[in-house]
Image: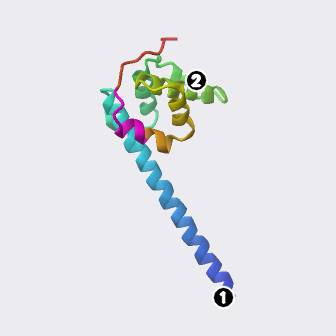
């Protein structure tokens, strides 16, 4: 019986640690998005508002607002998100490799983009 209590305490401790790390990574990504928006001359606080942050994201890369509707279509939303994220890399003068980093490792690449020396070059994406 004593061993079971020990395992439960260890499990609870591990759960708390995982949740704390997750919270810290989330705060880092949100702060990075805030900086990315600010570098583009857009309101940084928009990173905190769900849906509105996507609208600002679309404005930053030069995509039409109706693309927001595509993000609610299953499977299409994955493709659209990848396209927009690649556009984010492009408008900051980064290549497709960096864009794929933004897609697959946002917790590492958004801080590089937000807190690094990348400069916003304007929306180069075609208006589809």
Helix, strand or loop at mark 1 = helix
**Picture layout, residue 110 above or below residue 127:** below
Q: Residues within 10 Å of mark 2 (few under 14, many from 20)?
A: some
As rendered, which of 10 and 49 lies closer to the eye? 10
Number of callouts: 2
Give the residue at x 43% y 17%.
62
Residue 69 rendering spot, x and y as whole percentages? 55, 23
Give the residue at x 50% y 31%.
98
| Left or right side of 30 for 128 | right
| Left or right side of 116 for 10 | right
**Cα distance, mark 2 to mark 1?**
54 Å
Give the residue at x 54% y 41%.
105
As rendered, which of 21 and 56 lies closer to the eye? 21
Question: Could you say which disc has been placed on residue 57 in the image?
Answer: none
Residue at mark 2: 70
Q: Is residue 46 visible?
A: no
**Quadrant in the picture for residue 43:** top left
Q: Are marks 2 and 1 in contact (CB under 8 Å)?
A: no
**Quadrant in the picture for residue 80:** top right
Helix, strand or loop at mark 2 = helix
Residue 10 rendering spot, x and y as whole percentages? 59, 75
Disc with the residue nearer the chain's start (2 vs 1): 1
Residue 17 rendering spot, x and y as whole percentages? 52, 65
Q: What segment carries the magenta color?
A: 111-119
Question: Could you say which disc has been placed on residue 2 in the image?
Answer: 1
């Amino acid at each position: 019986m004593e061993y079971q209590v020990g395992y439960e305490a260890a499990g609870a401790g591990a759960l708390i640690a995982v949740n704390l790390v997750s919270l810290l990574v989330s705060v880092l990504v949100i702060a990075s998005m805030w900086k990315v928006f600010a570098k583009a001359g857009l309101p940084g606080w928009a990173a905190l508002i769900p849906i509105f942050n996507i609208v600002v994201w679309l404005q930053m890369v030069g995509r039409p607002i109706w693309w927001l509707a595509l993000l609610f279509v299953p499977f299409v939303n994955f493709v659209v998100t990848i396209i927009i994220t690649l556009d984010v890399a492009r408008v900051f003068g980064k290549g497709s490799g960096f864009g794929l980093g933004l897609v697959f490792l946002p917790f590492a690449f958004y801080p590089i983009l937000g807190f690094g020396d990348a400069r916003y070059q304007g929306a180069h994406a075609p208006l589809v």
